[in-house]
């Protein structure tokens, strides 16, 4: 477990445990969606200075294909499912049971396959969080985006940036048939969501 | 000034959220921007430049690195030039960023407010904006070259432009 923090270590470990449970539910949903091929585990929960987030998340300045789900309201946040081009195309091809497309433009059906993946993963994750924090979380429809990973994460961090010099991000590791995939999920809670998560962690203590 | 607020490595330094950096030819600074604004200040005669990655428009008494807020970031950069004896009246600015990401949905959209605050602070200091690449819905990768004063802007799927 890789947990860097400005909270107490014990609380951060409890937070990791809570979010690992949500990730497990997302993993089960992902396995069902991909016929058992793809699973995920929580890699790290990090409380990181804003200026270090891109490096901690290992986003560099590469172009990525991403599915973004946002949560509005007091308990808000952003969930980003990110792939490099090759991995995104591979997933779309596997889901659609066809050869990987070489067309530089993503077709509507490829985008739809990835959007649905983000939707399934995000809803399972957020359903678990709904139970933990006792507030119903309804995400936006998934949004397909091709952009620099760091710029998308920056936007997701805006609400945290307004009231803090650090950001909490949750990073996930994917496997497909036992082989590690170059996919990432980032969950960035809003300050309100962070407070709810802290309360849930405190109740667990 | 917080040490973490300054991109430490020069020559080809990434400038992350809230960071600023000051340098001279042949230094180059890079940044990836969403709704944040990258501000490059340049003094052509000495090939001296500074770059800041502004996150929010106003500090409003909040703590944080000077580069995080437009109202503290621009004075901070100006001060760095002044400490080198470089006159403000010879400085020029180029700015990029301020996008409304996620199709203007979701988390707070701060790009336009960032742009307005940066413009206001540069106008107060009477520093002309010689080039700008702002707004839209996509992120930008930028590189500022202290040798030339050129700010190179790249948007996914588009040909890079030089300001």
Image (cartoon, rainbow, N blue to C red):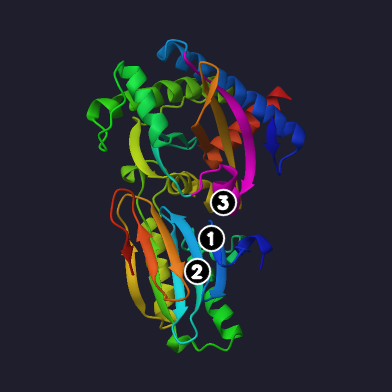
In front: A126, or A61? A61
- Quadrant for the N terminus of chain A in the image: top right
Q: How far apart are marks 3 and 1 (CA)?
A: 21 Å
Answer yes or no: are tags 1 and 2 on the same subunit. yes
Q: How far apart are marks 1 and 2 (CA)?
A: 8 Å
Q: Is mark 2 on a helix, strand or loop?
A: strand
- Circle 2 residues within 10 Å: few <14, some 14–19, many ≥20: many
Residue A131 percent coordinates (x, y): 54, 19
Nearer to us of marks 3 and 1 is 1
- Circle 3 residues within 10 Å: few <14, some 14–19, many ≥20: few
For disc 2, the chain is: B
Residue that label 1 marks: B15
Residue A71 percent coordinates (x, y): 43, 34
In front: A174, or A13? A174
The magenta region covers: A37-60
Quarter of the figure with residue B118: bottom left
Quarter of the figure with residue B82: bottom right
Question: Residue B96: in sight, yes or no?
Answer: yes
Q: Is mark 3 on a helix, strand or loop?
A: helix
Rendered image: mark on residue B51 = 2
Q: Is mark 1 on a helix, strand or loop?
A: loop
For disc 3, the chain is: A
């Amino acid at each position: 477990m890789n947990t860097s923090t400005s909270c107490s270590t014990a609380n951060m470990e409890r937070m990791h445990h809570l979010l690992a449970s949500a990730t497990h539910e997302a993993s089960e949903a992902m396995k069902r969606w991909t016929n058992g091929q793809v699973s995920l585990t929580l890699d790290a929960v990090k409380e990181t200075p804003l200026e270090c987030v891109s490096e901690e998340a290992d986003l560099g300045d590469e172009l990525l294909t991403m599915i973004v789900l946002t949560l509005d309201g007091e308990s808000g946040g952003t969930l980003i499912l990110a792939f490099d081009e090759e991995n995104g195309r591979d997933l779309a091809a596997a889901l659609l049971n066809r050869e990987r497309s070489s067309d530089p433009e993503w077709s509507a059906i490829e985008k739809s396959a990835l959007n649905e993946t983000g939707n399934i993963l995000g809803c399972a994750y957020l359903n678990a969080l709904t139970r933990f924090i006792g507030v119903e979380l309804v995400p936006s429809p998934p949004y397909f985006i091709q952009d620099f990973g760091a710029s998308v994460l920056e936007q997701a961090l805006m609400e945290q940036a307004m009231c803090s010099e650090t950001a909490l991000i949750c990073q996930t590791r994917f496997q497909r048939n036992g082989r590690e995939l170059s996919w990432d999920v980032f969950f960035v809670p809003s300050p309100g969501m962070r407070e709810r998560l802290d309360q849930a962690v405190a109740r667990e203590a | 000034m917080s040490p973490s607020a300054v991109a430490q490595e020069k020559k080809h330094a990434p400038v992350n959220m809230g960071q600023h950096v000051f340098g001279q030819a042949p230094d180059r600074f890079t940044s990836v921007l969403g709704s944040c604004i990258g501000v490059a200040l340049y003094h052509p005669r000495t090939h001296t430049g500074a770059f800041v990655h502004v996150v929010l428009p106003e500090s409003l008494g909040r703590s944080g690195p000077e580069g995080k807020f437009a109202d503290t970031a621009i004075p901070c950069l100006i001060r760095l030039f002044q400490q080198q004896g470089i006159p403000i009246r010879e400085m020029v600015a180029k700015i990029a960023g301020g996008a409304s990401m996620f199709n203007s949905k979701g988390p707070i959209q701060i790009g336009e407010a960032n742009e307005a605050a940066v413009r206001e602070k540069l106008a107060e200091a009477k520093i002309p904006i010689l080039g700008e690449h702002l707004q839209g819905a996509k992120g930008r990768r930028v590189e500022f070259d202290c040798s030339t004063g050129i700010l190179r802007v790249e948007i996914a799927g588009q040909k890079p432009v030089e300001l």
